[in-house]
Amino acid sequence: MEYLEIANGPILLLLCALTIGVVAVQAIIFVWMAWRRGQEIGLTKQVMRRTMTNSALFSIVPSMPIIVMMLALSQALGRYFPWLRLSVVGSAAYEGMGADLAAQSMGLEGFTDPDMTPKIYVVIMFVMTVGIVWGILFNIFFMNRLDKFSKSQKEKVAGGFITIFSSALFVALLITLSVPYVANVQNIQAIIAFVSSGVAVMILNKVAEVTKWRLLSDFSLPIALIVGMATVILYVQVV
């Protein structure tokens, strides 16, 4: 059996839809509870409707990179599993990296390798699902303590160890995500995508700064992702 028969099959559709349905119901319940609470504290319906509308509009921009990544993953991983991952707890940066690491551990070049099998596909699903759970569990059990410790340190020493440590962790995360791609001279396509996307972001942010068009800056990430993919497609077609 071809792995895409599983990836695009009715069983996976049902499982993913059920999970996303549970999350969607939770969101509806939270909106209902928030509405009732707003009425209890005296907020008018007009104010609450405007708040809901503004929140929905401001949610569009952060969702654009997720949609682009979902479409990119769907080509190799099927229609339903990327939909599940990026609708619940997945992130645009993590999902592609997790799928690549899982595929490479099974001897493939990446999750887009044409030699993908159902067994390797299941391994990729397992790694992508279980790999991100630990951050959630850490937040549940330790985030409150970590937050209190961070606030206490910031109050004692402004710009001290916590600030430097947090910045160092963020830089380390960016390096971990990018170096395997941009430092691999054998993967020219990844370097082209990285450079073209980076240039696109800088140009868009500069134009937004000059024109005072803030919306252009807000959409710079999804536009840069599309520019990077389009540049690679053009490179492959020409070369």
Image (spheres, helix red, strand yellow):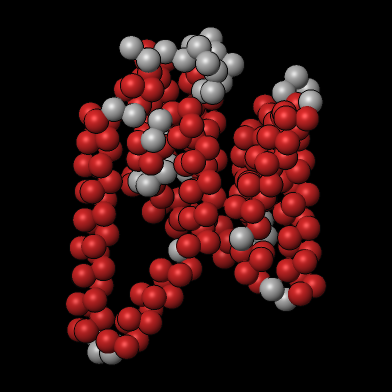
* Camera-side residue of 72 and 41: 72
Quadrant where the N terminus is found in the figure: top left
- Side of 18 relative to 158 (left or right): left
* Camera-side residue of 32 and 187: 187
86 over 56 or under it: above or below: above
From where the camera sits, is residue 61 visible? yes
- State which quadrant residue 181 falls in: top right
- Side of 34 relative to 199 (left or right): left
Quadrant where the C terminus is found in the figure: top right
* Camera-side residue of 177 and 213: 213
- State which quadrant residue 109 falls in: top right
In the displayed orientation, state which residue is furthest to the front.
Answer: 237
Q: Position of residue 25 (x, y in %)?
A: 21, 56
- Side of 105 relative to 120 (left or right): right
161 over 18 or under it: above or below: below
Q: Position of residue 29 (x, y in %)?
A: 20, 63
234 over 126 or under it: above or below: below
Q: Position of residue 130 (x, y in %)?
A: 37, 29
Q: Position of residue 199 (x, y in %)?
A: 78, 49
Identify the residue at image location x=65%, y=40%. 229
Q: How many marks?
A: 0
* Camera-side residue of 146 and 39: 39
- State which quadrant residue 209 falls in: bottom right
Identify the residue at image location x=48%, y=27%. 76
From where the camera sits, is residue 105 visible? no
Identify the residue at image location x=54%, y=31%. 97
